[in-house]
Amino acid sequence: MAVKLFITDDHYMIVEGIRSLLQFEKDIEWLGHAMTAASCMAFLQQQQPDVILMDINLPDKSGIDLCKEVKAKYPAIHIIGLSSFNQQSFIQKMMDNGASGYVLKNATREELKEAIETVIGGNNFLSPEAVTTILKNEDSKIPVITRREKEVLLLIAEGLTNHEIGEKLFISTTTVDTHRKNLMAKFEVKNTASLIRMAAQFEFIKW
Amino acid sequence: MAVKLFITDDHYMIVEGIRSLLQFEKDIEWLGHAMTAASCMAFLQQQQPDVILMDINLPDKSGIDLCKEVKAKYPAIHIIGLSSFNQQSFIQKMMDNGASGYVLKNATREELKEAIETVIGGNNFLSPEAVTTILKNEDSKIPVITRREKEVLLLIAEGLTNHEIGEKLFISTTTVDTHRKNLMAKFEVKNTASLIRMAAQFEFIKW
DNA sequence: CAAACCATCCTGTAAAAACAGGAGATTTCC
DNA sequence: GGAAATCTCCTGTTTTTACAGGATGGTTTG
């Protein structure tokens, strides 16, 4: 029996590319595609695929959040994250939210087929590059920061001094400094510049 | 006569997607594709297409830099930037470096055809979304920084102090400080934290 | 309930960055 | 050739961070 496949990606060319790559596969039945998280959920009310290839960046919400929702409602569906970013933070979040696999957009036909077969078999699949990323950054984990620390971090990134942040949050300058100190310890850096760089890299800062 | 088309993109699915979208167009002759900037340049020594669809993120160098090189060597080639990012900074840099157009990866077949025809006709083409972005962010310009300033900027982001940077680049600490000062002036910020944030936003810093 | 964690605050010192206001030398571009 | 830009370096002063080493009260949780 053919694997029912669905794609959620707002990039028309990617959808076309995957369709083109898999069009002659008899074991794969193409159910269609959605360009937004909302239309993906709407489709699932009608039909349930076996596998969803899901982009990480969607116009209405992140694929990471959508992944969680889909798995909550339809636990039987296998989700494979799809992204051009070979970034550990994304991969980790996606897998944490119930994804069974993660494939990069420069994957070959064979890799794509292997990914689909693997997750159908109940196992997890990661692109070789993604595996490398995970292994490489095994030790350097993404720090867990508190709500207050994040608040302070964003204000630092905006260019406020400790004093200004203190006034804004109604706390003492020394408290802000302590938060900054703890942030630097958690990120394992020794000054603000690299703190902000790391925070941007790990996507604590968005724009 | 058919338009000779070449693609430089490291995302296999995108290449497949575009090929699939344009396969039945008689006016378009598919010359092939390159996955890296280096192999693109190598190909151009053999054959020159009329139009190159060029991704902004390539493994060996940015499409923005590659664009500049290609236009310097082969001014007759029309380059269309290709990206999933609808970001003004990218678009502007690409056009500054000689690109004739900019298309998003969620473009339809019609949009793609129109883009190719337009640039062949000697005119510029921008995806409708890209036009909106440009118009919206008209005022917030991306600073133009020098090679040396960029060098210093990256070292600042890595967490080095003025003194350490000076040692690394064999220049005085005060010179580094001057560069930092000028960078802050150009980015219109008043401290390092927001400098790094802005630099990350405008993608001067990569990872 | 005790251990962890969190947020708050403190003193003090050293280092670094921010700010002002130059100036000379070289390269680049018109 | 000359103007503009770039890179280099300087002397100061003030502000801000970085670093050390605490302490207190509150909340969460095994």
Image (cartoon, coloured by chain):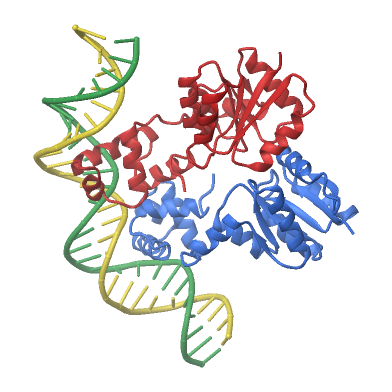
Chain colours: A blue, B red, C green, D yellow
Where is residue B179? Give x, y as percent: 28, 37
Foreground pick, D10 / A117: A117
Foreground pick, B181 / B100: B100
**Residue found at the far front of this picture:** B46
Quadrant in which residue B181 is drawn: top left
**Image height check: is B178 above or below A74?**
above
**Image height check: is A73 above or below B72?**
below
- In the picture provided, is A155 more to the left or to the right than A16? left
Q: Is residue B24 visible?
A: yes
**Image height check: is A17 above or below A79?**
above
Where is residue A64? Give x, y as percent: 66, 56
Number of labels in the image equals 0
Q: Is residue B138 visible?
A: no
Quadrant in which residue A183 is drawn: bottom left
Where is residue A119? Give x, y as percent: 74, 63
- Specify the quadrant that holds the N terminus of chain B: top right
Where is residue A135? Give x, y as percent: 52, 64
**Image height check: is B161 above or below D27?**
above
The residue under the point 75% across, 57% down is A116
The residue under the point 87% across, 56% down is A2
